[in-house]
Image (cartoon, rainbow, N blue to C red):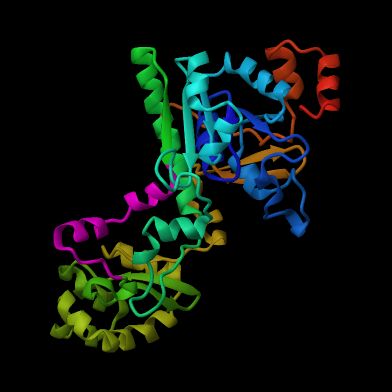
Amino acid sequence: MDLTHYVAGPYATRLMATQGADVIKIERPGFGDPSRHLGPFPDDNPDPEKSGLFLALNCSKKSVTLDLKKSTGKNIFLEMLGWADVVVENYQPRVMASLGLDYETLKGIKPELVMTSISNFGQTGPYRDYSAREINLYALGGLMYITGDPDREPLHMGVRLAQYGAGQNGFVGTLSALWHRDSTGQGQQVDVAISEYLSTILENALSQYSYTGSNFRRTGNRGYGRAAWGPYPCKDGYVGVIAGPDHRWPQVSELMEIGALADPKFDDRAGRGANADELDGLMLPWLLEHRKREIFEKAQDMGLAFAYVASPEDILGWEHLRERDYFTKVLHPVAGELEYPVGPYQPRGIDWELNPAPTLGQHNQEVYGDLLGFSKEDLVRLREMGVV
């Protein structure tokens, strides 16, 4: 049973649904998951059945509408609980308790239930009921502190990394809890804090402070005394130059056919860092004359770990991903045919099941009629009451 909305929770349940779980998404009558009302939309024309964000995050689920604030809606939810192995929700912690549907209550009804709760700051602690947006989470999780140039303000990354990372943690935590249930017969609540996901990936920043008492500094593209390291402009975008390890430096000079790069003062990282501006001045004219794919592929053929900054167009057209069957096309009854990444990994012997995301309340008859035994007349009354 999926009580999630926006990104983190729906991504966790998308991973479950596209690997074969039966996921019933419970949405607010008449409005649905708020992500239905966020873009991108085709031709910038808002339509709750055509939101690119919603469609991507809710493949292979079933949608029912249910107002959990109404007593009848709450009773229907509790009837459905008998069917479910897992409940996933990503409300603020106070919400489920206010509805009388918190884990302690549900555990009393069904001790083997696994309930996964994803929230900004977790189910406990003084910040548990605080609100946050992605920029707040980057700041409070610590990732913003180490991102950017040393003489500039901290930077926010351009994607919802915190949401997707927490969604993956929710997916893995749910699987662990199910294994525990299968071994012991007892369910549990999985408590995922989005901010803690970000703190977990701070590389060596926390260790550095723990060991030395000094804070990690933002380093930008010339971090750790490196030069010829990071994104550089080229003829059609940006290419990632990676000058390392030191014994590979002669190949950089060979790649660019610039004899001056073979000067011994550039041979090691310290020398390149001390002469970074001169090094950039030598490389940039050559880089600006060549295309990113050409530079990347030629460098890789020489054993250099170059890359290029790929646009969404590059990714969708990348033959490497096509050959790996990374994308699949899904035909939605309203939005039409759309293309999605299949999943974040490739399980051998198990196929991802990507069916179109549901329209709002698409499965009311199937779930309430077939699963709970409600008649068509019952559903008409429930709609008139605003329950579904």
* Residue 187 pos. (x, y %): 42, 19
Residue with the most extreme top position: 373
Q: From this view, report whether residue 373 is shown above or below residue 269.
A: above
Q: Quadrant of the C terminus?
A: top right
Q: From this view, report whether residue 82 is shown above or below residue 220.
A: above
Q: Which residues are magenta?
A: 193-217
Q: From this view, report whether residue 38 is shown above or below residue 115.
A: below
What's the residue at 53%, 55% (across, down)?
133
| Residue 285 is inside the magenta segment | no
| Residue 212 is inside the magenta segment | yes
* Residue 355 pos. (x, y %): 63, 33
What's the residue at 15%, 69% (across, down)?
247
What's the residue at 86%, 26% (across, down)?
384
> Magenta region, mostly helix, strand or loop?
helix
What's the residue at 51%, 56% (across, down)?
134
Q: How many marks?
A: 0
One can see residue 347 in this view? no
Q: From this view, report whether residue 249 is shown above or below residue 142.
A: below
Q: Quadrant of the N terminus?
A: top right
